[in-house]
Image: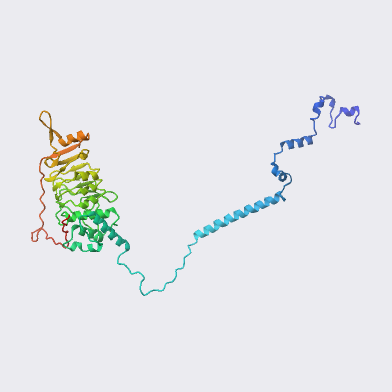
Amino acid sequence: VEEGSEAGELFTRGGGDVRNRPKIKPSEQTKQLDPLRAAEEAKKKNAKQVNKRFADLHENGAWGGLSKWEKYGLCTLALGAIGAAIGLGITFSKSDESAPPEQTPQPTLSPTDVPTVSPTNSPTTSTNRETRGLELMTDASPVLSLPSTPEELRGAKSNPDSTPQEIAGEFVLYDDELRIPAEDPRFIERYALSVLYLSNGGCAEEWIDSTNWMSPSLDHCDNWFGVKCTLQGRVEEIILKQNFVSGKVPIELSQFGELRALDLSGNAMTGEVPGDLGGLYKLFSLQLQNNMLTGEFPFDELREGAIALDTLWIQENGGLSGEITEAYCTLSSITLDCANFEPQPTYVVDDTGVETTTTTFEQNCDTAVGTHPREYTCNFGTGVKITVAPTPTPGGGDIPTLVRDTYCGVPSVAA
């Protein structure tokens, strides 16, 4: 059929009668496109937007005079070089750690006939311990005159003119096997205990029980009779009641910074109570009753320092006196002799003339402070004094003969 003929208009190239198809409006005829052109238009429509700066790289692979594959190759080489450098660094670091340190060759010194430095008899640390130890002991015994050098303490225990402090100093510096450093608080505490033993009848074998005291191989904590310590090895209790302890209360007892209980009751203690006991700032209980103490009791000094004090028993000391202050109103328990202390702690008489159980001291506390000790005993009696045990004498039958190769020390007049 020839094109342009009537028959040619009735059939399409693909076959079929076009007369049965709806006629296309002229306005829609422009939308009918060739399939290939429609696909190209759709591809352009769905194409990814490319940054204009890299349009040339996306279009033809050219960028800066190099093709896309050349640039990919250069990047790969750069990354490979970086990886190789990191690998070499790790390898060398491991080899350095495993290799033994290089030994620095020491120069060979020719021997000399005379040593450059003269050898010392004792290590420097030992010398420092002795020097510092003597300083601490001198501070602890201020009323005495200890030697100026530690070496002068050697032989003190065999010298009849030595003081208890000098013998104690020799013990802790030279005879003590524990060798406690001078800066350790236990050093000065061991010295103070030694002074107590030497100056208060322990060395003279007057004590009923002096088990392990002054033993150079045993720690004083829980080994020396009557001494209890904290877990850190600091003395917290000295309980020597009814043990025939005699002499004055040593001023060295003020060195126990952790002491909570001091019980020297029922003994033969004499002299005044030192105000230095106020340095025992953790002291909770002080029991000095039933002794032969004299002088004025240091109420003010004791309370100013011993802020934790809760129990004070000082009765049955006929020569002990003093003025108790309102600072003691908050204690739990106080016992003293009625006749010796001011204000006179006598019992209050009520309006009917009957004597009450309240003392004038308790009444004053309630007025001034608003409280008074829970237990306050005004003692009118006299304590039963102990009898010092007889000293064994030579030829006394079953009583062993005392053989003394050391001295206990002669107390200083100043002490």
Question: In the displayed structure, does residue 17 sit left or right of residue 41?
Answer: right
The quadrant holding residue 199 is bottom left
Numbered marks: total: 0
Q: Nearer the viewer, residue 156 or 346?
A: 346
Q: Position of residue 413 (x, y in %)?
A: 15, 56
The quadrant holding residue 350 is top left
Above or below: residue 229 compared with residue 12: below
Q: Residue at x 22, y 41 (%)?
A: 310
Say which quadrant the N terminus sits in: top right
Q: Nearer the viewer, residue 225 or 182?
A: 182
Q: Position of residue 411 (x, y in %)?
A: 16, 57
One can see residue 178 in this view: no
Q: Residue furthest bottom?
A: 113
Q: Position of residue 221 (x, y in %)?
A: 25, 52
Say which quadrant the C terminus sits in: bottom left
Question: In the displayed structure, does residue 370 sit left or right of residue 354?
Answer: right
Above or below: residue 344 compared with residue 169: above
Above or below: residue 405 compared with residue 257: below
Question: In the displayed structure, does residue 368 sit left or right of residue 394?
Answer: right
One can see residue 278 in this view: yes
Q: Nearer the viewer, residue 238 or 65?
A: 65
Q: Nearer the viewer, residue 326 or 258?
A: 326
Q: Residue at x 80, y 26 (%)?
A: 27
Q: What is the image's colouring?
A: rainbow
The quadrant holding residue 166 is bottom left
Q: Position of residue 125 (x, y in %)?
A: 32, 61
